[in-house]
Structures are given as C-alpha cells and as structure tokens.
Image (spheres, helix red, strand yellow):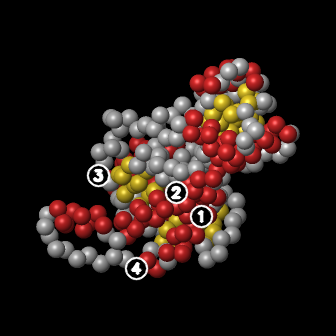
C-alpha cells in the first residue's frame, strides 16, 4: 500500500515538501510523488488539491482520495471516480484561522474607512470621516461549520454584532444563529457585511442570484471565501451598480484563475484576492498521515465525506 502526493500545483507547497512532512508524522509509510511513483498499482491513496479525470484510471487499486483542503465538491461529483473509492477532507486549524483573519481584515478596511483615507491622501486632502461604532455594525456569517464558527467567534470577540446562518440549527455563544432558507433574505437585509463560507451543494450553487442580492442592505459588503459558484457573477455586477451590495470582496470565483477578460477585475466595487485566504495547512498533514495508516489498518477515517451529500 502506498500514498501518492499529487497536487499538480507549481505555486504552493511542492509534492516533495508535502511528502516529507507526511513521512515525519508516519516514518514507516510508503509515500510517493509523481516523480517517484513506481508501480501505480501499489497506490491505494492519493492526496490532491483537485482530482484529475485520469487519477482513477492510472491508479487501479485506489481506495481513498484525500483532499488537501476542505471543499470536495469537484471530487465527489467526478464521474470518473468509482463509487467504491472513499473521500476525506481536512479540517485544519491554520486555514480556518487564516480565513477568519481574511474576513476580519477586509471588514475592518471598510469599517475604518481605510480606502476613503487612502484616496484622500493621494489628493493631499485632510478629510476626517467618522467610523461607525463596532457595536452598531452587524456582520452575517453564512455557514457555521469549522471555518464559519471560527469566523463568527473572531468577529464577535472584536465587538461586532454577529448573526450566523446555516442550513440546520446551530448554537454559538453570543451569536444570533438562524437556519433555513426562509430566514436568509431577512437576515441579509439587516447586515452591514456578509461573510460567505458555504460549501458547494445543489442548494448553494447560484444561491446569490439577482433576487437574493436584492435582499441585501444598501451599501453593504459581500465577502466570499467559500465557493465561487455560490454567486451569479453577472447578477452581482448588475447588483453592485444598484448598491445592493455596495462592494464585494471575492477570494473565490466561478472560474479559477479568473480570466483576464472578466469584468470583475475592473469593476470599481470589486476586490479580488487569488484564493489565498486559507493558505497554510499547519499541522493538517498529520491527518493525511493518520488517514493513510488508518486506511492500511482498516480503521475509521478522519473527516470522511458522505459522497451522497457532498460534504
């Protein structure tokens, strides 16, 4: 049994670096990379950022696909992946912290009028502008899983009023938690900032269409670090010109990399970051090593995904 590290990326950790870290947590594990794969029939687990269509065909004895991250929608929906192959994701602390910090940074940038003051400085204008009290600012957090809960708690601890929304009931201390589709439009109308950290499911794809965007508060800010297919981007562009929302900060887009001709690049009310909010894995590679050992021993996996539900 062997574990193949195959990210296919050149602008992140190398496969060799990931393999070295996994070996540190499991010194006896047979960990390989594409350059050291040997006999593909010996590979029973592959760790990926995105599953390629040829992974399953090249690895005839594949039993487990380990996502090096949280979102697994493109893996579980891949028709080339045989039904018997299991899927697991990561739930590491480091990217959850990083994504929460990303939301907080862009909320504070708007909240403290930093863009306004930067523009004034470029014009050499001394123009005081009062910030809104933090306690008077309402932030919505859509998705209250591992990352969303961390984000809601961080924003709460800074002093914002925080409203959380999820598909099923959740409880977080000093956070107003709502659930169900019917609660969402009314919630959006009361939020100054909306942080989206939702998975990609049939229920969430295109959820932020023209109608849902129109439910947002005038001048509010929409921030998305979940999945790019949550937002109808054409509808968003039109909605921004109407001021609902007033600004969008997108770490994810429907197509990545975002094409050069996308109007999102040049829209005056859009800020783009290139899917960097949850950059670091931290100690999560220990879970990759642990899942390989568990798979080899026939033990329950960490963070296994229900392929029928998509998460």
| Front of the two marks 1 and 4 | 1
Secondary structure type for disc 2: helix
Find residue 36 and report its horizontal and vertical position in percent.
63, 25
Quarter of the figure with residue 35: top right
The crowding category of the residue bearing disc 2, from other C-alpha atoms within 10 Å (few below 14, some 14 to 19, many at least 20), is many
Q: CA distance from mark 1 to mark 3?
A: 30 Å
Residue 116 located left or right of residue 137: left
Residue 150 - label: 1
Residue 44 - label: none
Residue 121 located left or right of residue 82: left
Residue 39 located left or right of residue 131: right
Q: Are marks 2 and 1 in contact (CB under 8 Å)?
A: yes
Find residue 266 and report its horizontal and vertical position in percent.
29, 45
Find residue 40 and report its horizontal and vertical position in percent.
70, 21
Secondary structure type for disc 3: loop
Q: CA distance from mark 1 to mark 4?
A: 22 Å
- Can you identify the residue that label 2 sits on? 99
User: In the figure, 152 relative to 251: above or below?
Assistant: below
Q: CA distance from mark 3 to mark 2?
A: 24 Å
Residue at 24% across / 68% down in the picture? 117
| Front of the two marks 3 and 2 | 2
Q: CA distance from mark 4 to mark 2?
A: 24 Å
Q: CA distance from mark 2 to mark 1?
A: 9 Å
Residue 133 - label: 4
User: In the figure, 269 relative to 49: above or below?
Assistant: below
Tell which circle, 4 or 2, labels the residue nearer the N-terminal end: 2
Tell which circle, 1 or 4, labels the residue nearer the N-terminal end: 4
| Front of the two marks 4 and 2 | 2
- Can you identify the residue that label 3 sits on? 268
């Amino acid at each position: 049994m062997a574990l193949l590290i195959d990210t296919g990326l050149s602008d992140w950790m190398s496969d060799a670096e990931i393999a070295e870290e996994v070996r540190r947590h499991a010194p006896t594990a047979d960990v390989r990379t594409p350059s050291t794969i040997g006999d593909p029939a010996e590979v029973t687990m592959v760790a990926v950022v995105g599953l390629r269509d040829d992974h399953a065909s090249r690895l005839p004895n594949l039993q487990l696909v380990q996502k090096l991250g949280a979102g697994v929608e493109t893996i579980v929906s891949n028709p080339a992946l045989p039904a018997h192959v299991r899927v697991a994701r990561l739930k590491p602390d480091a990217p959850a912290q990083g994504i929460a910090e990303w939301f907080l940074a862009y909320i504070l940038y708007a909240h403290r009028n930093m863009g306004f003051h930067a523009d004034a400085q470029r014009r050499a204008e001394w123009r005081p502008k009062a910030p809104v009290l933090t306690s008077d600012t309402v932030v919505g957090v859509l998705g209250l899983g591992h990352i969303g809960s961390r984000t809601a708690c961080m924003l709460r601890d800074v002093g914002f009023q925080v409203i959380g929304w999820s598909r099923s009931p959740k409880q977080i201390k000093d956070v107003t938690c709502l659930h169900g589709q019917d609660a969402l439009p009314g919630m959006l109308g009361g939020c100054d900032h909306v942080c989206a950290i939702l998975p990609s499911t049939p229920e969430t794809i295109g959820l932020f269409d023209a109608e849902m965007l129109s439910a947002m508060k005038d001048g509010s800010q929409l921030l998305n670090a979940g999945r790019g297919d949550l937002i109808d981007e054409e509808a968003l562009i039109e909605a921004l010109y109407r001021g609902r929302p007033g600004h969008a900060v997108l770490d994810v887009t429907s197509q990545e990399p975002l094409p050069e001709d996308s109007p999102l690049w040049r829209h005056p009310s859009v800020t783009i970051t290139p899917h960097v909010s949850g950059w670091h894995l931290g100690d999560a590679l220990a879970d990759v090593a642990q899942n390989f050992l568990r798979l080899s021993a026939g033990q329950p996996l960490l963070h296994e995904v229900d392929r029928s539900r998509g998460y």
